[in-house]
Image: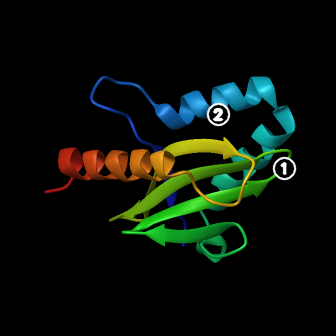
Amino acid sequence: MEFTVEFYVNAAGRTPVQEFLDELKQSDPDDFAAVLAGLAKLRNRQYHREPLTKAINDGLFELRHIGKLNSRVFWFFVKGRRIVAVHGVRNKGQAIPARDLDTALARMNDWQARHET
């Protein structure tokens, strides 16, 4: 049961998760490698549960990596065994900042409005 993982592209052509990963690669190569490995694991259904992933709400999930800072990539499922990663964030606490959750939900809604029938 393989899934494909793709990154959200906004209407202007930007790819926020790729930008997040590029910044992470420069600032913390070890966490970058761990997050990239986590994204690769999402292709396999057995990893769609804790501790690697967790359901947030409204069909949104988070990929979690605990390192110097907590790194998270928010994503959702799409028909055809697809996963779309919409937002990446690092923070010190366990709680998800409201602005990051709002950003992830807005990007998920934008993707759905532009791609689904």
Residue ID at (75%, 48%): 92
Quarter of the image with the C terminus is bottom left
Q: Which mark is residue 67?
A: 1
Number of other residues with Cα within 10 Å of mark 2, as a class: few under 14, some 14 to 19, many 20 or more: many
Name the kind of residue labelled 1 in the image: Gly
Residue ID at (64%, 33%): 21
Where does the image place residue 83, in percent across and percent down from the top left?
A: 46, 57
Where does the image place residue 50, in percent across and percent down from the top left?
A: 68, 75
Viewer-proximal residue, 55 or 102? 102
Residue ID at (27%, 29%): 11
Number of other residues with Cα within 10 Å of mark 1, as a class: few under 14, some 14 to 19, many 20 or more: few
Mark 2 or 1: the one toward you: 1
Dividing the picture into quadrants, the one containing residue 96 is bottom right
- Residue under pointer 2: 21
Residue ID at (30%, 23%): 12
Dividing the picture into quadrants, the one containing residue 76 is bottom left
Q: Which colouring convention does the figure follow?
A: rainbow
Where does the image place residue 27, in percent across and percent down from the top left?
A: 79, 26
Secondary structure at numbered mark 2: helix
Where does the image place residue 33, in percent across and percent down from the top left?
A: 79, 41
Q: Residue furthest left?
A: 117
Dividing the picture into quadrants, the one containing residue 52 is bottom right
Secondary structure at numbered mark 1: loop
How many numbered callouts?
2
Which badge, 2 or 1, is on the more N-terminal residue? 2
Query: Is 107 positioned to the left or the right of 61 in the image?
Result: left
Name the kind of residue labelled 2 in the image: Leu
Q: Is residue 17 above or below residue 41?
A: above
Quarter of the image with the N terminus is bottom right
CA separation, marks 2 and 1?
Answer: 15 Å
Q: Is residue 12 above or below residue 95?
A: above
